[in-house]
Image: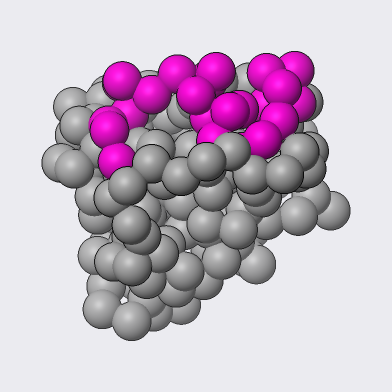
Amino acid sequence: MRRRDRCTRPGAALAYADTMSTEPRAGRPKVSSRETIAEAACELFLEQGYERTTVAEIALRAGVGRSSFFNYFGSKADVLWGGFDERADAACAELAAGADVRETLRGIAVGFAPDSLALAITHAGAMGMTDGLVAERALRQARLGRAITAKLVADGHPDLPAEIRAAAAAAALFAAVWAWAAAPGRTDFPAVLEEALGYVPG
């Protein structure tokens, strides 16, 4: 199992954002770790904005080479979305294999606390990525919706109701992530997802 980002430990993201110095820090000792690189990226996103931050700057702040960054992340976006995307990819594969829609969505939430994404959601303005987050969410929500639609159609549901139900289910997952990020004290993510799924027909 991959270790979780230091800046993505439960509750750590907001505390980190509140206490972080705004002065640039010297590069850390050369330690090639997912956690150190992710923390460096989060610092820089908060200090100077997401778009202005380069992979080279993240690597320098973390005290590693560019190749070390790409050993763990395919892009800057992966720092925030990587853990979620891994689970979403697995969910799409499970749906294609015939897994139940609701149980598959619940599986995404089990043992997962997307704190790095929550940091971006709650500090999107400071990071200069409000529009970017909306666009990234839409792409992922549409992809999951297509996978759910295909599963429902394969189960014999007509195309139109299948697409509507799938869109609602995918929206519920992402709405749960956003609601979880905004919740004071960070309630249990699976519980928030379960509430969201309760509003999905069928």
Residue, x 71% and y 30% (percent of image)? 64
Please name the residue shown 31% across and 20% down the image. 52
Name the residue at 46% across, 51% down: 116
Q: Predominant secondary structure in magenta?
A: helix
Picture coordinates of residue 95, whole percent (x, y)? 65, 37
Residue 183 visible to an observer of this rendering? yes
Residue situated in front as seen by the camera: 124 or 16: 16
Q: What stretch is highlighted in magenta?
A: 47-69
Q: Nearer the viewer, residue 185 or 53?
A: 53
Q: Quadrant of residue 108?
A: bottom right
Q: Does the magenta stretch include residue 49?
A: yes
At which x and y percent is residue 28? 64, 44
Q: In the picture provided, is 192 more to the left or to the right than 47? A: right
State the image quarter where residue 70 is shown.
top right
Q: Is residue 195 magenta?
A: no
The quadrant of the rendering that contains the C terminus is bottom left
Q: Which colour scheme is used?
A: one colour
x, y percent for residue 27: 59, 38
> Taking 121 as reference, is 197 left or right?
right
Q: Residue furthest front?
A: 26
Q: Which of 123 and 172 is in front in this view?
A: 123
Let me know if residue 96 appears in the view. Answer: no
Q: Which residue lies furthest to the right in this view?
A: 1
